[in-house]
Amino acid sequence: MAQRIRVSAPHGEDYDIVIERGLLADAERLVNEFGLGGTVAIITSETILDLYARPLAQSLPNAKVFAMADGEQHKNLATFTMLQRQLAEHRCDRKTTVVALGGGVVGDTAGFVAATYMRGVRLVQVPTTLLSMVDSSVGGKVAVDIPEGKNLVGAFKQPAAVLIDPTVLATLPPVEYRCGMAEALKHGLLADVTLLEPRLHAPDQIEAFLERAIRVKVDVVEQDPFEQGLRQTLNLGHTFGHALEQVSQYAWKHGEAVAVGLVAAARLSSRLNLLDEQTATQIEDLLAETGLPTHFHQYEPEALWQAMHTDKKWQSGHSRFILLEGMNRAVVHEDIPKEEVIAVLASMRRDE
């Protein structure tokens, strides 16, 4: 059964998130209901180019496909410029709809292209990974990375729709599925402990799992669409995770880095007597049981600390961390002493 979640967005740009098996194969609905009958620019990744992008383009009346390389290291200004120029070379105009077909890297990059090409064209998000389904495709934040930090160049761009076809998860590699679980479990820690229950992680529960995880984010972004307060809590674990990604030059996958970040946030919360040690341990055990990493090798805590200085939540050089004061109680804490953060990072570093 199809699930439909209505998102209230600023400036009357409300949109629907539709969760339905077989949706990508229903060309008639894609054209008539979701407005893909005109000129469509499908931006995708090389991995799913033949798997989903070309078949989708062939089913639509006037669609072109543009592929970018896989991996966070390609979510950059060079790729952004390449795609902008390709759209121009193929005479895409202001009536063009950009379809972001792929994982979070594609969604962020294609979304930023749509936000800026000819000062903004219509965008439809079609996430194909668990991570992008429960997190990055929802809420209108789009961006690319620069060497100084992750997601530092971007915009707010609300999609016209988010179309989720769970059948595409059948081709998702297990490691990518686990990466998506990190973001979904984060939503469980923030607002819905049901998401932490193993019974909801079964394959036959995927629609219910997706809906609950997505509703957590929707509830937050509707209250704080431009990340002025509450929405910052969605970055639980991300200050640590983004630093790990940056220092590793994006050798770490986002979801795996977030998992380590969630452990670090729980440990820091416990160290500061905000969270009881038992709950912090339960969080770490849950992530480990899901197959996600809970520690790191090689990188020096000092290097990770320095990488955190470009975190978007920090202001005027003052540190800001999302910490837990209990299950479903995330709070922004400022000016956490460096030595406390370093101590947590040191406790999580393992020798090879």
Image (cartoon, rainbow, N blue to C red):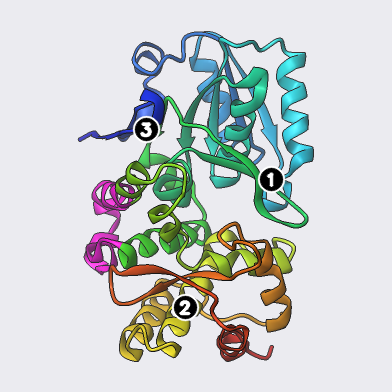
Residue 170 location in percent, x, y?
42, 47
> Disc 1 marks which residue?
75
Q: Secondary structure at mark 2?
A: helix
Q: Measured along the vertical axis of the image, is residue 164 above or below residue 183?
A: above
Q: Measured along the vertical axis of the image, is residue 130 above or below residue 292?
A: above
- Which amino acid is tagged 1? Lys
Mark 2 or 3 closer to N-term?
3
Mark 3 or 1 closer to N-term?
3
> Disc 2 marks which residue?
263
Q: Alpha-carbon distance for marks 2 and 3?
A: 32 Å
What range of the chain is rendered magenta? 191-216
Image label count: 3
Q: Alpha-carbon distance for marks 2 and 1?
A: 26 Å
Q: Nearer the viewer, residue 316 or 176?
A: 316
> Disc 3 marks which residue?
9
Q: Nearer the viewer, residue 305 or 4?
A: 305
